[in-house]
Image (tube, helix red, strand yellow):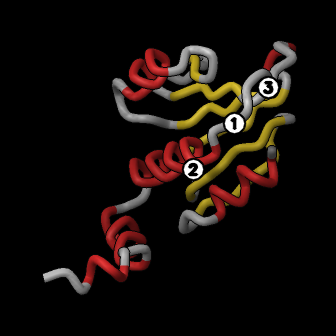
Amino acid sequence: MRDRLAELAGGLPGVVAEDSFGHVGFMLGRKRIAWLLIDHHGDGRLTLAVKAPPGELETLMAADPARYFRPAYVKSWVGVDLHDVEPDWAEIGALLEQAWRMTAGKRAVAAYDAEHADPDRAHDH
């Protein structure tokens, strides 16, 4: 799980994985965009908490309550259960990218978008 998450987060400019307090933090500079929580406060679970805009958590919980939950201590973040359900890696990648976009500066986001532009769309007239 850690390697897969580090691979997804590592594709975002400036994001590094940092072992901290028995968990793994995903950092952009000094700002944390996600936590991989391992047996957090003895809950026996493996979960991911990701920074998210207001309303995102409620939308995801309504769509898939077995997979998404409200994590403790971090308001408006999204909790993703990695323990009892097969992870939706595409959704997790999108959540990590969204958290990165919320934290990165406008120039970094513009450079990332330019680098990842769909070459087929560039030729549309």
Q: Amino acid at mark 3?
A: His
Q: Quadrant of residue 47?
A: top right
* Residue at mark 3: 83
Residue type, label 2:
Gly
SS category of the residue bearing label 1 = loop
Q: Nearer the viewer, residue 107 or 4?
A: 4
Q: Is residue 44 left or right of residue 10?
A: right
**Does residue 69 show up?**
yes
Q: Residue furthest left?
A: 125
Q: Tell me whether the residue at label 1 lies in contact with that at label 2, contact meaning CB atoms closer than 8 angstroms.
A: no
**C-alpha separation, residue under disc 1 versus residue under disc 2:** 11 Å
Which residue is disc 1 drawn over? Answer: 87
Label 1 vs 2, first from the N-terminus: 1
List x then y, in percent, for residue 45: 81, 21
In the rendered image, which quarter contains the N terminus? top right
Using a 10 Å C-alpha cutoff, classify the residue at mark 3 as few (fewer than 14 neighbours), some (14 to 19) or many (20 or more).
some
Q: Is residue 55 above or below residue 36?
A: above
Q: Position of residue 77 (x, y in %)?
A: 50, 28
74 left or right, relative to 63: right
Neighbour tally class for label 1: few under 14, some 14-19, many 20 plus, Cα within 10 Å: some
User: Residue 114, position in %: x, y?
Assistant: 35, 77
